[in-house]
Amino acid sequence: MEQYEDIKSELQQELHDLQQNVEQHSIFNKEVWQRAVKRYSKQLYRKNLFSAIFLVIVITASNLILQWPWWLLLPVDIFLAWIVLDSLISTNGLRKADVQSREGLLSLRESMRKSSSYSKRKQIIIRIIALILLVVMFIYLYLYERDFFASTLIGCIAASLAGPWFAKRTKKQYNDLGEEIDELLKE
């Protein structure tokens, strides 16, 4: 009987040690996961910030280099500035992600949903405005500056081919981060 008690206490001690080991492992994985989500959200924010800065530099450089009339440059600049500001505002929640609390994770997930997709109506409005501006720009180039017409047309075709690829890749990154946040929320 004494042997039975010794074996029982030994098994209970081993079970207790295993439970502590599993608990420590689970906490460690959660902390690693939280750090990964925080790092990934900051990376997406920085990527968006750098692309916005690049676009502002392109706008400024094109205004200085190209001597087009103000009535053509102003609407294009306003349109691009609107896209940049909208992008920066929508991804602001990714800058300082709170991954420690449930509320912070829910806020981060909501911020990601806003920044990763436009509504169908907003997409249509953006495409219509962009198309109108492109048509006006190409008419002006064709009528007054034909030497820029071909290079601008080639640039627009290249951008229309590369743009969807970049958009799809960025959307996948946002979806991956969303899945990681969902996994953290399950725990």
Image: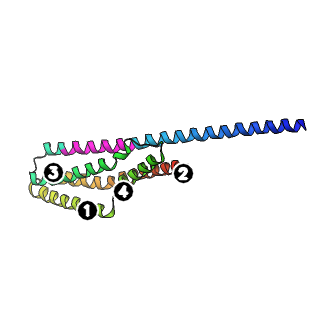
Residue 143 position, x and y percent, is: 10, 58
Spatial CA distance of label 1 from label 2 is: 37 Å
Q: Nearer the viewer, residue 111 or 116?
A: 111
Residue where numbered disc 4 is placed: 117
- Camera-near label (1 vs 2) is 2
**Quick one: SS at disc 4?**
loop
Q: Taking 11 as reference, is 121 left or right?
A: left
Tag 3 residue: 148
| Amino acid on which disc 4 is placed | Ser
Q: Position of residue 17 (x, y in %)?
A: 71, 36
* Residue occupying the point 15% across, 59% down: 136
Identify the mark nearer the N-term, 1 or 2.
1
Would you say the residues marked 1 and 2 are in contact, meaning their CB atoms lie under 8 Å apart? no
Lower position in the chain sequence, tag 1 or tag 3: 1
Circle 2: residue type: Lys
Mark 2: which secondary structure?
helix
Helix, strand or loop under label 1: helix
Q: Is residue 47 magenta?
A: yes
Q: Main secondary structure of the magenta part?
A: helix
* N-terminal label among 3 and 2: 3
Say which amino acid is labelled 3: Phe
Residue corresponding to mark 2: 186
Q: Position of residue 87 (x, y in %)?
A: 30, 50
Between 31 and 10, the one lying in front of the other is 10
User: Is residue 177 left or right of 60 when viewed as pictured?
Assistant: right
Between disc 4 and disc 3, the foreground one is 4
For the N terminus, which image quadrant? Answer: top right
Quarter assignment of residue 15: top right
Report the residue at 20% width, 46% height from top: 59
Q: Which residues are magenta?
A: 43-59
The residue under label 1 is: 125
